[in-house]
Amino acid sequence: MGRQGMQRWCLALALLLLPVSAIAHGIHGVQAKALLFGGPTAYFKAGAIHMLTGYDHLLFLFGVMFFLTRFRDIVTFITAFTVGHSITLIGATLYGVQANYFLIDAVIAISVIYKGLDNLDGFQRWFKMASPNLLGVVFGFGLIHGFGLATRLQAIGLPHEGLVTRLLAFNAGVEIGQIVALVVMAAVLAAFRHSKSFAPFTAVANTMLVVVGSLLFLAQIHAYAHTTYPDEFGFSTTNHILDHFSNDIPAGDDLTKPQPNADPQQQSK
């Protein structure tokens, strides 16, 4: 398969992954219940699961890992990200520092775009400037990633009793999940690094980071607009997906029936 063919297939994969990626950063269902009622063990497990299913975090870390070959460098950069991530995850949650999580997740999407662009030498090729100090950038984005997770945790409404212990357990789970993900990434990159296909793989993989990061950014801004200015769209908040796709639902489908929490004006249409 030629380079253009690889790029088309990877772009198609990125588009298919977008719906999953857009919701992956949230905390839903079983995880949310565990955080509301569980102890440290449940928090540890939820933290590990969240990291392993958090596509935005994993994409950024994949970009950071891409050209790191020495173990010392890997430890240095991942430690910088981990320290930043832990500071805001624990600190912002304990002190109640909040922000709109869709906007924070949009910045996280920018971090994915940034790393893909950096790996493609975009700053030198297109902006005629040296790349910013990578260690500082990784630490800074680590702060943002941790803050994004803190906003999600606070949206659930965590118990006050034993919160510090629970947060430490959750953060430990996040870091264990991160280590597992990094081992897999290192193995994949090592398999390609000394092959003839590494150059085209580099171009395709980092172009994917830019593309998927851009799509994630647009999805988060779209979600922010809906939650901040719902009346301007004419869609009910509780039936957002149904309103978007109601024209594609066959007549007689159960989804076309009025929903208990739907906007009365929307139901009457």
Image (cartoon, helix red, strand yellow):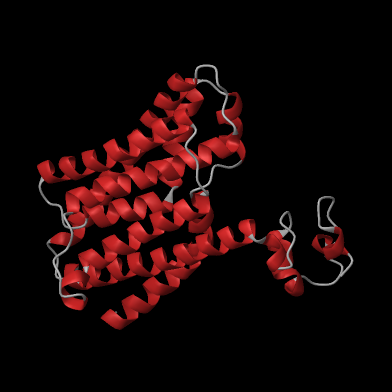
Please say if 28 is above or below 176.
below
- Residue 241 visible in the shown view: yes
Is residue 172 shown left or right of residue 264?
A: left
Q: Where does residue 99 sit, x and y in percent of width and height?
A: 50, 46
Q: Nearer the viewer, residue 190 or 158?
A: 158
Is residue 240 shown left or right of residue 151?
A: right
Is residue 6 shown left or right of residue 167?
A: left
Is residue 167 shown left or right of residue 176?
A: right
* Quarter-of-image position of residue 130: bottom left
Q: Which of 202 and 169 is in front in this view?
A: 169
The residue under the point 39% across, 54% down is: 108
* Quarter-of-image position of residue 254: bottom right
- Which residue occupies the extreme right position in the image? 268
Please say if 196 is above or below 154.
below
Please say if 235 is above or below 37.
below
Q: Where does residue 69 sit, x and y in percent of width and height?
A: 12, 51
- Can you say which quadrant of the picture contains the C terminus? bottom right
The residue under the point 40% across, 59% down is: 109
